[in-house]
Image: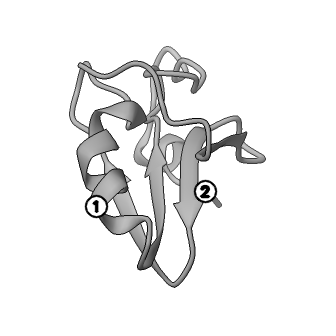
Amino acid sequence: MADTVAPEWTRATAPDGTSFLRAGSGAPVLFIHGVGMNAAIWQPQFERMVGRFDVIAIDMLGHGGSPLPPQAPELADYAWQ
């Protein structure tokens, strides 16, 4: 799995602590990884799409740079409110 990202990508943190990668401009495309992965897994897709789209890949709760979920998470814990 890819853990490093290209230097031109921006790694940022949303107000709720969710970490994400972002690069490019244009219509937004959101990538969401599977369990046990992180946003960097989308590197090949980012490289092919960054010239035409605003590509965004999030680290789900408990993955990559995002915080751990609460002990008894509810659906709302996985979404911005």
Q: Quadrant of the N terminus?
A: top left
The residue located at (34%, 53%) in the rendering is 47
Out of 80 and 38, give the one closest to the viewer: 38
Residue type at mark 2 is Trp
The way the protein has been coloured in the rendering is one colour
Distance of label 1 from label 2 (alpha carbons) = 28 Å
The percent position of residue 45, horizontal first and vertical second, equals 26, 54
Q: Which mark is residue 80?
A: 2
Secondary element type, mark 2: loop
The percent position of residue 10, horizontal first and vertical second, equals 66, 46
Out of 12 and 70, give the one closest to the viewer: 12
Q: Which mark is residue 48?
A: 1
The percent position of residue 78, horizontal first and vertical second, equals 47, 44
The residue located at (71%, 47%) in the rendering is 14
39 w.r.t. 36: above or below = below
The residue located at (57%, 76%) in the rendering is 25
Secondary element type, mark 1: helix
* Farthest right residue in view: 15
Image-based side of 64 in relation to 41, left or right: right
Residue type at mark 1 is Arg
Question: Which quarter of the picture shows residue 43?
Answer: top left
Mark 1 vs mark 2: which is more N-terminal? 1
How many discs appear? 2
